[in-house]
Amino acid sequence: MTQELNKPIENKRNYQLDFLKLIFSILVFFFHTELFAGENVPKLLRCQLGEVSVHFFFVVTGMLMVNSIMKHDPPHTGAPGKSAITFVLRKFKGISWQYWTSLFIFMVVYLFIYNDFTVELTFVNLFRAIPEALLVHYAGLTLMFNMPLWYLSAMFLSMLFLVYLIYRHRDFALYVFSPLTAVFTLGYMGQVNNYLFVPFYSLYGVVVGGVIRALCGLCFGVVAWLIYNRISQWRLNRNGRIVLTIVELLLYTIFFTGWLILQDNMVIMSVILILPIALAISFSGKSYISKLFGFKWMKHFGVFSLAVYLNQWTARYLVHKFFPDCSYKNGVLLMALFTIAAIVLYFAIIYFGKALWKKLHKKLVDEQEVVEQ
């Protein structure tokens, strides 16, 4: 085990990453407006806009996952399986209110639109939503309601395996398994689907495409962390920071040009390989670009990026149901307005729900007994 793997990583929350999350959440939003375009789909929506955006989220999650393990967890553990499941459950707990609230809002809208709240169909669909509520629908039970939630199910299922491997064989998991799995799964997807990301709902062997995409992205995130860890140890002077800033700008320029402008599938798969390097530089905070993201109010970027991602599908359903013949421009505008309304409701439910739960928790749980345990 090398010394650098055992060294704790110290860094504050990175608002530059939060800003990028918000941008990519908005791109996912626009990707889902394709429904309103009919045959005249805007060019921007024809470049795997949603697929690459979700891959970005997987990569960032993988990078932050390793960083969290290296900061808070010991390099050796006698119970790697228990440590892995505890880690994953702790990560889900951090977004559980957001996840279940967005699913609840969508289910209410769905039942209203398609069932008119008839008793039998209501119970049928509520029971069918159990795998999604338990976050296991991308183990193969891919029937889902709030469709963007597939990303979180596939991510946590893949994360459990990867985290276990990091706890059990840290050096192998970080330096061998993750880099090879990242490039092999990306290459596999390119070969079986003509240089397109595989559909997240299709079965490939014993896993669905979403799990392959999640494992690919998480492993690229591990690679990004390894690069970040090396950069964070550099003692750069002003000239070094200028060079690193230029490299970061160049990498993002190549990435976004190949993805959004050239729009060639093989080019897109190729420029994805440099995304972990760019993210590692951003996460390190050593380029001058990071200085633009040092304001505390920017902490809200991460909160709103998750809110947009989780609630835009509800808005899409509402527009599709009540304004089926609207123009693309009006469809986008209406979807944006409904997304904002859903987000307001989402924050209100979370706020009052947490307050109510806190009161119930005090009545149901003996705090003294919990502390003693």
Image (spheres, helix red, strand yellow):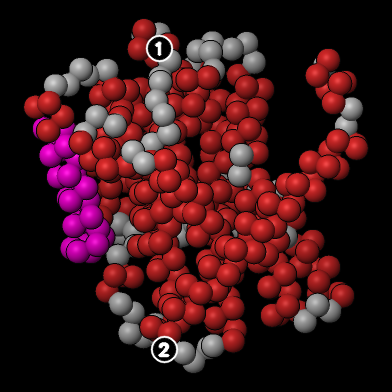
Magenta stretch: includes residue 227: no
Percent of width and height locating residue 88: 60, 33
Q: Residue, x 89% and y 27% (percent of image)?
A: 366
Residue 277 visible? The answer is no
Percent of width and height locating residue 74: 53, 13
Q: Residue, x 54% and y 81% (percent of image)?
A: 319
* Residue placed most toward the observer, 223 or 116: 116
* Callout 1 crowding tier (Cα within 10 Å): few <14, some 14–19, many ≥20: few
344 to 335, vertically: above or below: above
The amino acid beneath tag 1 is Lys
* Residue placed most toward the observer, 168 or 118: 118
- Residue ranking furthest to the left: 239
Q: Residue, x 41% and y 54% (percent of image)?
A: 22
Q: Which residues are magenta?
A: 243-267
Percent of width and height locating residue 167: 53, 19
* Callout 2 crowding tier (Cα within 10 Å): few <14, some 14–19, many ≥20: few
Residue 126 appears left or right of 325: right
Residue 262 visible? The answer is yes
- Helix, strand or loop at disc 2? loop
Magenta stretch: includes residue 244: yes
229 to 192, vertically: above or below: above
Q: Residue, x 80% and y 19% (percent of image)?
A: 371
The amino acid beneath tag 2 is Ser
* Residue placed most toward the observer, 319 or 47: 319
Residue that badge 1 annotates? 7
